[in-house]
Image (cartoon, rainbow, N blue to C red):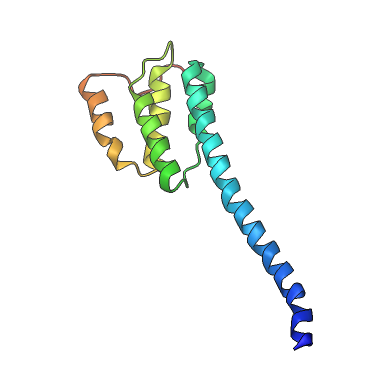
């Protein structure tokens, strides 16, 4: 019986390390997802056209779960915004990103832009 207890610390320590690493990885991805969304939100709020354009283009297309839903909601809200310049370019970038994210819920917003005859094409970029 004493031999069994001598091996327990050798088993518990590696298992504890694996569990700890898993918790850090899962928790870390949540933090990075939150910070990525917060950064996007802050960039769009500043109103800097170039920074917004680049931030929207840098949104990963493989988002999942709550991060995907929140990102789509933010992009849909931004789609209707009027920018100081290059509004059509930003809307086109948002439209492409929504398509990459397979955001079917954004179709009514895109149709509304067309109905209101708002620009969705290039104004600044070539």
Asked if one can make out residue 126 in the rendered structure from this viewpoint, the answer is: no
Q: Relative to 15, is 86 on the left or the right? A: left
Q: Give the residue furthest to the top.
A: 84
| 94 left or right of 51 in image | left
Q: Position of residue 11 (x, y in %)?
A: 72, 74
Q: Position of residue 109 (x, y in %)?
A: 27, 30
Q: Is residue 63 above or below residue 113?
A: below
Q: Nearer the viewer, residue 83 or 21?
A: 21
Residue placed furthest toward the bottom: 1
For image coordinates 60% across by 46% down, the residue present is 28
Q: Residue at x 39, y 28 (%)?
A: 92
| Residue 61 screen position, x and y as percent | 47, 43
- Which image quadrant for residue 22? bottom right
Which picture quadrant has residue 13? bottom right
The residue at the point 38 percent across, 20 percent down is 88
Q: Is residue 32 above or below residue 10?
A: above
Res. 7 visible in picture: yes
Which part of the image, by quadrant, shows the N terminus?
bottom right
Q: Residue at x 24, y 19 (%)?
A: 117
Marker count (numbered): 0
Is residue 9 placed above or below 60 in the rendered structure?
below
Outermost residue to the front? 1
């Amino acid at each position: 019986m004493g031999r069994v207890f001598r091996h327990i610390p050798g088993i518990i320590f590696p298992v504890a390390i694996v569990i700890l690493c898993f918790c850090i990885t899962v928790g870390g991805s949540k933090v990075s997802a939150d910070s990525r969304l917060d950064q996007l939100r802050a960039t769009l709020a500043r109103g800097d056209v170039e920074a917004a354009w680049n931030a929207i283009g840098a949104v990963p297309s493989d988002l999942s779960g709550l991060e995907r839903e929140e990102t789509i909601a933010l992009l849909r809200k931004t789609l209707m915004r009027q920018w100081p310049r290059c509004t059509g370019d930003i809307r086109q970038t948002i439209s492409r990103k929504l398509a990459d994210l397979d955001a079917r819920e954004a179709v009514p917003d895109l149709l509304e832009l067309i109905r209101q005859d708002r620009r969705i094409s290039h104004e600044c970029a070539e």
